[in-house]
Image (spheres, rainbow, N blue to C red):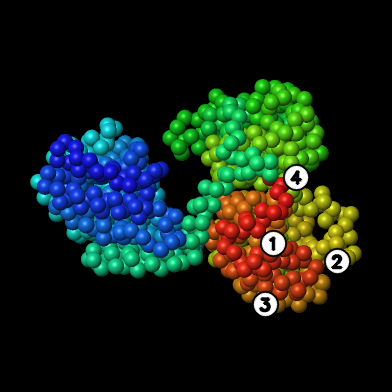
Amino acid sequence: MARYELVKRSVALITLTNPPVNSLSSAVRHGIAKTMDRALSDPKVTAVVICGENGRFCGGADIREFSGPMRGPPLLPLLDSIEAGEKPVVAAIEGVALGGGLELALVCHYRIAHSKARLGLPEVTLGLLPAAGGTQRLPRLIGIPAALELITTGRHVSSQEALKLGIVDQVTEQNVCEVAVEFALRAVAKPLSSRRLSALTVPCPPDLDALLEAVTMQIQKKARGMMAPLACVQAVRAAATMPYSQGIKRESELMATLFNSGQARALQYCFFAERTAGKWTLPSGAQWNDTKPREIRSAAVIGLGTMGRGIAVSLARVGISVIAVESDKKLMETGRQMVIGMLERDAKRRGVSASLNLLKFTLSLQNLKDVDLVIEAVFEDMALKKRVFQELSKVCRPTTLLCSNTSGLDVDALAGVTDRPQLVIGMHFFSPAHVMKLLEVVCGPRSSSETIATAMSLGKRMGKVSVAVGNCPGFVGNRMLKPYSDQATFLLEEGATPEQIDKVLEDFGFAMGVFRMSDLAGLDVGWRVRKESGLTGPDVDPKNPPRRRQGRKYCPIPDMVCEQGRFGQKTGRGWYMYDKPGGTNAKPDPLIQNLLETYRSRYGIKPRNITDQEIIERCLFALANEGFRILEDGIAARPEDIDVIYQFGYGFPRHRGGPMFYASMVGLERVLERLEHYHQAHPDVSHLEPSPLLKKLVACGSPPIQKWREHIKTMHSHL
Ligand code: NAI
C-alpha cells in the first residue's frame, strides 16, 4: 500500500499504491506510518519524497470506510508526525491531490506539482470538512480569503493556480518524482521550522469579522440549509483566532457534528448514486459493461425551439457535426442566430474556439440521409411527432438511430411508425438543454441494447448524468412531478398561498418552490396539455361535477390563472407578479389572493391554517409514493436512479439525497403512516394512497435503501 525505495543513495521514495486514486485507506495509512518510520530512523536517508502510483498522488479518504468502525492509524496524528520530522519531506504531486491527499501534501515541507495536476479540498461537497488539519494549515499557507473560498466551495484548482496561490512551490512538466528527488536533495540541511505550516501564524486580514460574515451570508443564500460550508467558515475562523492546537480541536468537534448529521450521509449517498446511475441492465441480461455503443460522428436536431437549440449546442461542443432542421425560413434564421450565439458564449467561457463549422441549417428532412443519429424536438404533439418519425424512417439510412426529446409521450408508439423500432429511443433533455446535466434515456420495449448503450454513451460524452428509464407517461421525473404539484394546488384550495408553499419548499432546500418554478417554465405549457387531454377547455363543464375530472379530484385553479392570460414570468404575471414581462423578481399578487378567496367561497371551502409540516409531508411524501410505484412498475431500476433524476433535473436539494433517500431518512413507517392519514382525509386523491411497495418494505422491517432492490427484483422490469 506504500512502497519504499532508496534512490540517489539518500532519498527515501515512498509511493502510495492503492488504485485507482491511492485513497488513504487504513492499509495505506498503515503503509505511510511504517515507511515514514523507516525513512526517519535510517541514518542513510537524508530526505523523503512521497508520490502516488499510476500518475495520481492521492484522491483523499476512502469514502467506503466512513460507514464502518475506524480501523488503522488515524490520519491526523500521522500527518502531524510527518510535519514534525527532522528530515525534509517533499510531495511529488501528479494527477490529483484532493481532500486528505492535499492535507498529506500540506504536511510535507515542500510541494512540487506536475503542470496537469489538480488540487483541492472537496470534503464540503460530501457534507464534511477537511478534518486532518486542512482547515488549519491552508489558511496559514495562503491566507484567510483564498483558503475560505477553496474550503467552503470544494473547488479544485490547476497546478498553475496553486502556484499563484502559494499552495505549491514549483510546477513542472517533467517527471515530477525525479524533479522532487533533486529538490529534496537540495533541501537537506536547510532549516525546516518555516516549512511547518502548523507552527506559522495566520496572515489575518484586518476586517476578519466582516469577511467571515459576508461569506456566511453568501453561503446561506446559495447553499440553502447546508451545514458543511458554514462549519468550514467556523473552522477557518478558529484558524484565524486560535493557536494551532486549539484550532485543530475545533476542527475535530465541527467534523464530529457534520459526520453524524443526516446531510453527510445524504451527500455521500449522492456521490455513489451518481456513479451507479449509468449502469443499466435489461431483463434480457444485456448490460452497460457488455454492450458496445455505436460511434456518433454526425447528428441532426429537428425543431430549433427552446430545447432543440440547447441540444444542438450540446452536440456541437463535443465535436459532433449537427444538421438542424426548422419548419420555416424565419424560424430557421432565428434558431441559427440563437445557436451560434449560445455556442460562441459557451466557447468564450471555456476559453476554446467555437465549433461553428460543425453546424448546418436546413428546412428539409431530405438532407438527413447520412447522419448517425437524429434527435427530434418538435412540439409535444403525438400526431406531428409520428409524421416526423415516419418521414425520418423513409429518408435516413437504415442504421440511423431515431431519438425523441418528448417529455412524456409514448416512445414505443413513435417506434411503431418506423421501419426500425429497435433503433428508436427517448433522449429526454432538461431545459436549458446545454446547461442542465440530466438526461433521461427512455428505453422502449423494442429499443435494442446497442441503441441504449449509444444514447447513454452520447449523454456521457455531452457531460450529462444519464439515467436509463422505462417508457410510461411522463417517464420518471415528470410522472412524479404530477402528484407533487397536484398536492400544492390542493393545498391552495384548502387555505395555503403560493408564497407560503414556495417558502416551505425553498427552506427545505429546493432551488425554487413549485409555483415559482411553474412561473419560470411557463404556465401555458401544462394548460395546453390539460386542454388536449380533455381536462379543461370550452367543451368541459366545470360545474358538472365540480372539481372532478375523469373520475378523479381535479383542481381548476391553474386553468383559471391561465384564462386570465397569466402565463408566468414571460407575461409578467403568473402565480406571482413581476416588474415586467420576462422579469424574475417574484412578488405576491393580491389578485391571486382574491382569486383564491373567491374560489373557496364559490365552492364553500372554509380555509384552514396549513402548517409547514403538512406542506412538506403532502408534497414530498406524495412525490416519494409515486417513486415507489415507479420502482414497482420497473420504470426505474433503483431508488438511486430516481434520486439522481430529482437532484439533477428538478432542483431537489442534494443534502437531502433525493425523494427516495429522504423518505428512508424520515423512516418508511412514518411516511406510510402519514400517507394513510392524508389518504383517509382525501380518499378521492389516489396519489396519497400508499403504494404496495412502500407497504411491503415496511412489512419487511424497513430495510435500508441499498437493500430495497432485493424486494423489487421479483417485479416486472420495463427497462
Ligand atoms: P418549442 O415550441 O420551443 O419548439 C419546438 C420547435 O419545433 C419550434 O421552433 C417549431 O417551429 C419546430 N417545429 C415544429 N414542427 C416542426 C417540423 N415539422 N420540422 C421542424 N421543426 C418543427 O418547444 P420545446 O419547448 O423546445 O419542446 C420541444 C420538445 O421538447 C417537446 O416534445 C417538449 O415536450 C420537449 N421538452 C421540452 C422541455 C421544456 O422545458 N421546454 C423539457 C424537455 C422536453
Dot 2 falls on a residue whose secondary structure is loop
Q: Secondary structure at mark 3?
A: loop
**Callout 4: 10 Å neighbours few (<14), some, many (20+)?**
many
From the image, state whether disc 2 or disc 1 is nearer to you.
1
> On the picture, is 505 further left or further right than 11?
right
On the question of residue 498 being in view, the answer is no
Is residue 655 depicted above or below 392 in this figure?
below
Whole-Å distance between the Cαs marked 4 and 2? 28 Å
Residue behind mark 4? 409
What residue does disc 2 label?
A: 546
Dot 2 and dot 1 residues touching (CB under 8 Å):
no
Q: Which tag, 4 or 3, sits closer to the chain's start?
A: 4
Q: CA distance from mark 2 to mark 1?
A: 33 Å
Total tally of numbered discs in the picture: 4
| Residue 453 x %, y % | 61, 36
Apparent side of residue 470 relative to residue 276 in the rendered image (left or right)? right
- Residue 693 is marked as 1
Q: Is residue 275 left or right of residue 394?
A: left
Mark 1–mark 4 Cα distance, whole angstroms, equals 26 Å
Residue sitting at x 65%, y 61%:
624
Mark sitting on residue 609: 3
Q: CA distance from mark 1 to mark 3?
A: 32 Å
Note whether ligand 1 is within 8 Å of mark 4.
yes
Q: In percent of the image, x 77 and y 64: which residue is there?
A: 686
User: How far apart in space, not on screen, are marks 4 and 3 (Cα)?
Assistant: 38 Å
Would you identify the image quadrant in which residue 76 lies? bottom left
